[in-house]
Amino acid sequence: GYARLAGCYIYPTVDLLARGGGKGGDSSGVSGVAVFASWELDIWGRARSEREAGSQQYQAAVFDAEYARQSIAAMVAKSWILAVEARLQHALAQEIVRSSEQSLKLADDRLRVGKGDEYDLTLAQANTDSFRDAARQLALGYEQALRALETLLGRFPAALVEVAKTLPAMPPPVPAGLPSELLERRPDVIAAQRKVASAFHRVAEAKAARLPRIALTAGAQNITSDLFVLQNQSSPIVSLGASLTAPIFQGWALAANVDIRTAEQRLAAAEYGRVGIRAFGEVEAALSAGFAADEREVILARAVASNARTVELAQVRFKVGSGDLRAVLQQSIALYAARTALLRVQSDRRVQRVNLHLALGGSFDP
């Protein structure tokens, strides 16, 4: 609507005036109809600049809306991934609780047959309760993740939405040598560029407003009276003419408006630079975080395998009596921590890929 309004002043304006003023009218004695037309000759480009400024501002709003749509899509994707991760973290905690309960049962059996002591039993009980508490917290985190996803989907946050039982598969690796021209398609970058263009046209409009305005005028009227005799009996009357309006002094308002538009132009250019730098920063951050997550996943996968083997050996030593329960529980905690960290990194790899596509404004193809 604003764009259409800005473009209206380049066209002629036509007005109609009609009134009735006879004995039964408003007693003025005059009745008739008149049509007046006026068209400003846009010699200095004031109206064209205003129209172009409105058009560029409209395009900026379109691209801002598109970037908002992409951002919401990215938020939904990341919320989905985090909800799946929360579900897997909760399942992992429940698995650790079951394993801890088995250790607690084993310690209780050893105490009853005289091969263990109360220290091992109380230690196993304390660790089991700690794992149960962690599982309860993760259950709450899973519910909160579902509610966050439901809020983005426009649903009531009842934590009832279903998510997958496994993380989505990783897409192909990031190709080497991504061209920086990919950032030129980002909607927020295009919107900032359109705002710069609009600001330049606003400056031209403000400068043209200080120059004279020339308009062509035309009119046609037919006037009658029942009360008195009109001096000119010819009807209808057609007139053509032109008008010139030049601003002489308006309290320096026009000069101040030029200064304002010029400052807005510099502000739009600086904002364009800020958006561009932010775009580069977001791409670099997503790439760096993604590469780091790739390397960490390999390292943590080895750590999980090593800790799992260590737990097996500690359990064997405890069962044959050559080790104590403390070593089993310590290694179990280390294994749980490694598996939790691995799951977190696997989720982060996918989140960073979403961030990368949002930062690039699309896929890797130009």
Image (cartoon, grey):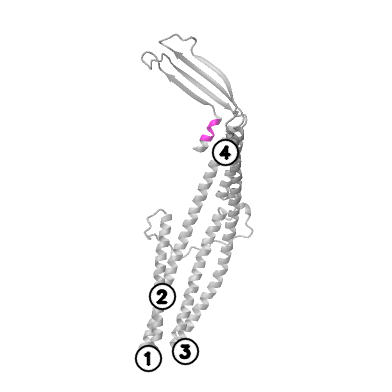
Q: Taken as a whole, is the magenta stretch helix, strand or loop?
A: helix
- Relative height, residue 194 to residue 313 (above, below): above
x%, y% of residue 148? 42, 59
- Relative height, residue 339 to residue 46 (above, below): below
Give the residue type at disc 3.
Ser
How many C-alpha atoms fall within 10 Å of the one at disc 3: few (<14), some, or many (≥20)? few
Label 2 vs 4, first from the N-terminus? 4
Highlighted magenta segment, given as a residue range: 5-9
Which numbered marker is on residue 130? 2
x%, y% of residue 364? 58, 56
Instruction: Write down the residue under mark 3.
Output: 322
From mark 3 to mark 1, how far is it between C-alphas? 15 Å
Is 350 contained in the magenta span?
Answer: no
Q: Is residue 97 visible?
A: no
Q: Nearer the viewer, mark 2 or mark 1?
A: 2
Label 3 vs 1, first from the N-terminus? 1
Label 3 vs 2, first from the N-terminus? 2
From mark 4 to mark 1, how far is it between C-alphas? 89 Å
Label 4 vs 1, first from the N-terminus? 4
Q: Nearer the viewer, mark 4 or mark 1?
A: 4
Nearest the camera: 246 or 39? Answer: 246
Q: Quadrant of residue 134?
A: bottom left
Give the residue type at disc 1.
Gly
Instruction: Write down the residue under mark 4.
Output: 53
Left or right, residue 189 beside residue 152: right
- Relative height, residue 323 to residue 164 (above, below): below
Q: Does the residue at mark 2 contact the one at mark 1 (Cβ under 8 Å)?
A: no
Instruction: Write down the residue under mark 1.
Output: 114
Nearest the camera: 313 or 220? Answer: 220
